[in-house]
Amino acid sequence: MSLNRFFILGAVGIISGCVTFPPQGLVKADLGGAVGYQHGLESSQFMIGKNKRNLREFGFIKVVGSKGTFAVDASNGAVIAIQDADSIEQQKTVAFTLEAYKHNQLVLDYFLNAGIPKEQISSVHATTSLFAGGGKGERAAIPKISGWQSVIQRVIEGVPVIDSVLWARMNDQGKVISELIFWPPISSKAIDEVKLLRAKLSKKPLREDFLSRLPRGLPPGNIVIRHSSLTAEGPFEVFASYDVIERRELLSSVDPTGKSEGRTAPAGWVVRHFDLEGNERKLPQEKARINFNTPKKDPGLRDEKSKASYRPRSE
């Protein structure tokens, strides 16, 4: 199923002026699939302020208020809402004074009331926003916690849905300072793949056959559901994956003195995805975009008229 197609054809939406917003609520999946969720301003606690106006720009459908902007990606329904930099909430050094677990509960209750399916939530954890200040020449101040972002993890058929996104940052009054939501429907095919992959790994002969198809030397992995990210372009993709986190190293050809050393240096970690048959997959957001006009042509050379008027900058 193409999420882009569903979003365009399935959304009658809320019309205000010339801007149409997708309907807030559950997003249907195919038979046997798992529903998604579309966030909307009508159920949001985001502090958008007064003097609201609607517009469409840069691929987003927006409501802009005196305090912030609530934006919906027109291609996939992803929502981002953020306060303006000069808003009262963004200027506060401390936005939430209570413990992280209380913030987690506030955010969880908020999204459950908005319509997120309870059975698709596995856990909630908090990340911190830090604040520190000081003048020129002063010793750096010790950062203090100014607030929390509570992140909700999605689960379907007992496995994590890695690329779905749901988090919010609130103040002490339970009002939203910022939030990000991308919770697309998951196809029945992906869910069937999870069941088959789980069955393979549960039986020794099938597990050994599956693992023999993977590159040698990989650490153990986990069954997950992967899908196109909220920033990916093109048709929506979703599949069950055996994800493996691999440590990568680079060969260092020279040391700081210029002598060849042949030493290795850690380069980080790479997540590799393998489908039901052991074939390695790349998510849309991981694929190289070789047709993206790199390097970009100078806009002054697009036609003969611009060629005539183009002059190189003086050094």
Image (tube, rainbow, N blue to C red):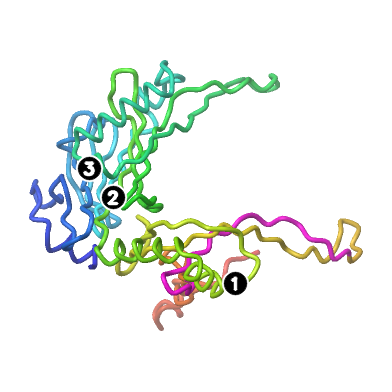
Q: Which residue, given by chain and number where applicable, does mark 2 sit on?
A: 183
Q: Look at the image and tell me in which quarter the C terminus lies.
A: bottom right
User: Is 121 located above or below residue 208 in the figure?
Assistant: above
Q: Residues within 10 Å of mark 2 (few under 14, many from 20)?
A: many
Q: Is residue 265 magenta?
A: yes
Q: Are marks 2 and 3 in contact (CB under 8 Å)?
A: no
Q: Which residue, given by chain and number where applicable, does mark 1 sit on?
A: 215
Q: SS at mark 3?
A: loop
Nearer the camera: disc 2 or disc 1: 1
Residue at 41% in and 78% down: 302
Residue nearest the observer in this picture, 13 or 284: 284
Left/right of residue 252 with respect to residue 227 in the rendered view: right
Residue nearest the observer in this picture, 165 or 51: 165
Q: Which residue, given by chain and number where applicable, does mark 3 sit on?
A: 117
Marks 2 and 3, how far apart at CA:
10 Å
Q: Residues within 10 Å of mark 1 (few under 14, many from 20)?
A: few
Residue 88, horizontal then vertical, whole percent: 35, 22
Residue 10, horizontal then vertical, whole percent: 12, 60
Indicate the amino acid at tag 3.
Pro
Residue nearest the observer in this picture, 84 or 131: 131
Indicate the amino acid at tag 1.
Pro
